[in-house]
Image: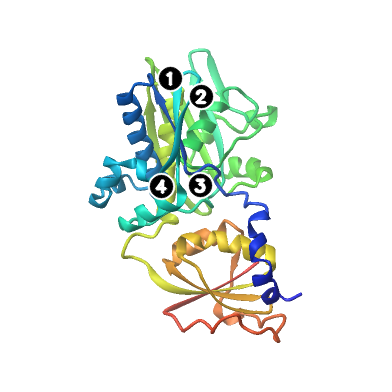
Amino acid sequence: MRLSKFLFVGCLSLFSLPSLAETVSNLYQVREPVTGQSPDERTRATQAAVETLVLRLTGDAKALQAPALAELRKDPQQIINQTGYESGTPQLLLVDFDPVSTDRALRQAGLSLWGSNRPTILGWWLLDATDGSNLIGDGQTAAEPLRRAAQHRGLPLRLPLADLSEQGVGTAKNLEGADPAPLKEASERYGADALLAVHGREDAGQWQAQWRLWLGDQREQGTATGASQDALADAVMLAVSQRLAPRYVAKPGASTTLGLEVQGMTFERYAQLSRLLEPFGGRLKSVDGDHISYEVTGSVEQLRSQLALAKLQEVPAGEVAAPVDAGAAPVAAPAPVTATQLHFRW
């Protein structure tokens, strides 16, 4: 059956489809440590949760000081569904934010948002402590602080198994080296989008780390410090989030209207593409056979980065193929000619 026949009769079942592997769950739930359940401590933790959420959704520390968010910072209850405490060490305040009102408030403040589809990161994490060095693997207890930090900062993190062969790869030399080839070769079986190499050390009770991040042919690097392993993990994940976000979040005023055509569409891919284009305000223009056209708002490089998450390949304009089913009728008027027209295929 043609894709154009599927789009409207099946739209109600979109939410029953499996999520993308890169979709971050619980993006609007924030946990903040508290020292008790007094009203003042609850207020402080709630304010901290708002700051954490804004950083998650924008990747921009400056967004916290946006004048248009002053009222929201003063009264965050307008975007909160519920709050509650979780026992543990430390005790946590769980703040459940409403996605619709949160997004609306941030956009009204002139902020651009990072969607829930984010690059999956494979973390090679080596820690040097007083009792020796440890490459943190997926099944280790030491992996929990890393997972908590990744969730806190809205990043999908995977860890290697850290088996005997990988112990020989995840060395200080490879993690601190400029050549990612040894790590990339060992990482292929995990199917992640980005590669993160972290070498942390304990020095006089303080933790510090060097980190490097590879996404495609682009590299980022930096340092981080923390009073504990948990604090160090959070500092690294925050830095990585702030380096990644500009690739996917358009700066206010810097967006343009783009035309996008994608070949090789199916109904399942349509659902996936719709989620990917949410941050760009994707507007469906036409469907012709296995070709679909959108009008989006953003930058060319940010759109390319987002589509790369679903492994779409860009097609040069001169190689654009005709639709497989040329008899399909468009569901809307053809997209107008825009300054930039991009073509991709599955």
**Neighbour tally class for label 4: few under 14, some 14-19, many 20 plus, Cα within 10 Å:** some
Q: Amino acid at mark 3?
A: Trp
- Measured in 3D between alpha carbons, the distance from the residue under mark 1 to the one under mark 2, in whole angstroms, is 8 Å
Percent x, y of residue 83: 44, 33
Of the numbered discs 4 and 2, the one sitting upstream in the chain is 2
Q: How is the image coloured?
A: rainbow
The residue indicated by pointer 2 is 127
How crowded is the residue under tag 2: few (<14 C-alpha within 10 Å), some, or many (20+)? many
- Residue 264 at least partly seen: no
The outermost residue toward the bottom is 327
| Mark earlier in primary sequence (4, 1) | 1
What residue did someone put label 3 on? 214
| Displayed quadrant of residue 292 | bottom right
Real-space Cα distance between discs 4 and 2? Answer: 23 Å
Task: Look at the numbered disc 4 and give the secondary structure of its residue.
Answer: helix
Looking at the picture, does residue 227 appear above or below residue 313?
Answer: above
